[in-house]
Amino acid sequence: MKNPLSTPTTRLNQILLQAAIRAERVNSDKLFEQRARENAQRLDKEEAE
């Protein structure tokens, strides 16, 4: 009997899941950088006042 984990559909699902996880990481990294920039700008503004 063939290994059920090696079917093309399952393999495709694994690839799609990995791609989705990577995209999620990239998005959260961008969001983190954006928040860090906003916080830095806010601190600069507060120090200038």
Image (cartoon, grey):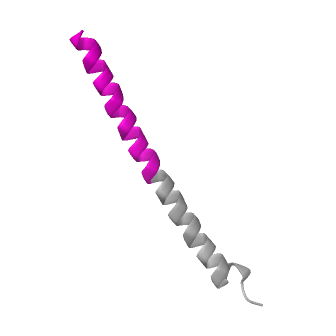
What is the x, y in percent for residue 31?
A: 42, 41
* Residue reaching furthest to the bottom: 1
- Rendered position, 27 above or below 41: below
**Would you identify the image quadrant in which residue 41 lies?**
top left
**Would you identify the image quadrant in which residue 40 lies?**
top left
**Would you identify the image quadrant in which residue 33 lies?**
top left
The residue located at (60%, 71%) in the rendering is 14
What is the x, y in percent for residue 29?
A: 41, 46
The residue located at (50%, 53%) in the rendering is 24
Taken as a whole, is the magenta stretch helix, strand or loop?
helix
Answer whether residue 37 is magenta in the image.
yes
Q: Nearer the viewer, residue 23 or 1?
A: 23
Answer whether residue 6 is magenta in the image.
no
Q: Quadrant of the N terminus?
A: bottom right
Give the left or right position of residue 41, taking residue 11 as reference.
left
Q: Quadrant of the C terminus?
A: top left
Q: Nearer the viewer, residue 39 or 6?
A: 39
Q: Which residues are magenta?
A: 26-49
The residue located at (58%, 65%) in the rendering is 17
* Residue reaching furthest to the left: 48
* Residue reaching furthest to the right: 1
